[in-house]
Amino acid sequence: MPSAKQYQLHKEYYKKYQETQRKEWEKTLAKVKSKGCKICGYNKCLGALSLHHRKPEEKIFAVNNSCFRKNKDMLKKEIYKCDVLCVRCHAELHWREQHDE
Ligand SMILES: [Zn+2]
Ligand SMILES: [Zn+2]
């Protein structure tokens, strides 16, 4: 059994590791999103930009802030399937998919 101190150290280490992972992922995501919305060019706020899968059948998971625990290669592959869209264009696109024709 690890001592309480060891356990505490491990917890601290793990927390720091997660924090680094999260920051690194946020940076990657910011870089991807920095080109702005593919439809209207909006790029003012990263929080209002999202990644849209061009082909829904290729989607394994949604690419967002909470993906930092995922495998980097998996993330890269998933990003390649996506276009950057602002929330408004994204919502309009999915609305049209469901309501047109
Ligand atoms: Zn847009
Ligand atoms: Zn979408």
Image (cartoon, grey):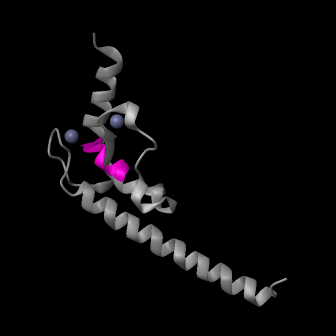
User: Can you give x and y, in whole percent of width and height, for residue 56 in the image?
Assistant: 37, 32
70 left or right of 98 in image: right
Q: Is residue 49 above or below residue 6?
A: above
Residue occupying the far right of the picture: 1
User: Can you give x and y, in whole percent of width and height, for residue 3 in the image?
Assistant: 81, 88
**On the image, which quarter does residue 25 sit in?**
bottom left
Q: Is residue 13 above or below residue 78?
A: below
Query: What count of labels does the image hold?
Result: 0
Q: Quadrant of the N terminus?
A: bottom right
Q: Residue at x 46, y 70 (%)?
A: 21
Residue occupying the far left of the picture: 41
Q: Residue at x 28, y 29 (%)?
A: 92
79 left or right of 59 in image: left
25 left or right of 38 in image: right
User: Can you give x and y, in whole percent of width and height, for residue 30 in the image?
Assistant: 29, 61
Residue occupying the far top of the picture: 101
**On the image, which quarter does residue 86 sit in?**
top left
Closer-to-camera residue (1/41): 1
Q: Quadrant of the C terminus?
A: top left
Q: Quadrant of ligand 1?
A: top left
User: Can you give x and y, in whole percent of width and height, for residue 6 in the image?
Assistant: 74, 88
Residue segment shown in magenta: 77-86
Magenta-colored stretch includes residue 56: no
Closer-to-camera residue (4/74): 74
Q: Residue at x 26, y 55 (%)?
A: 33
66 left or right of 47 in image: right
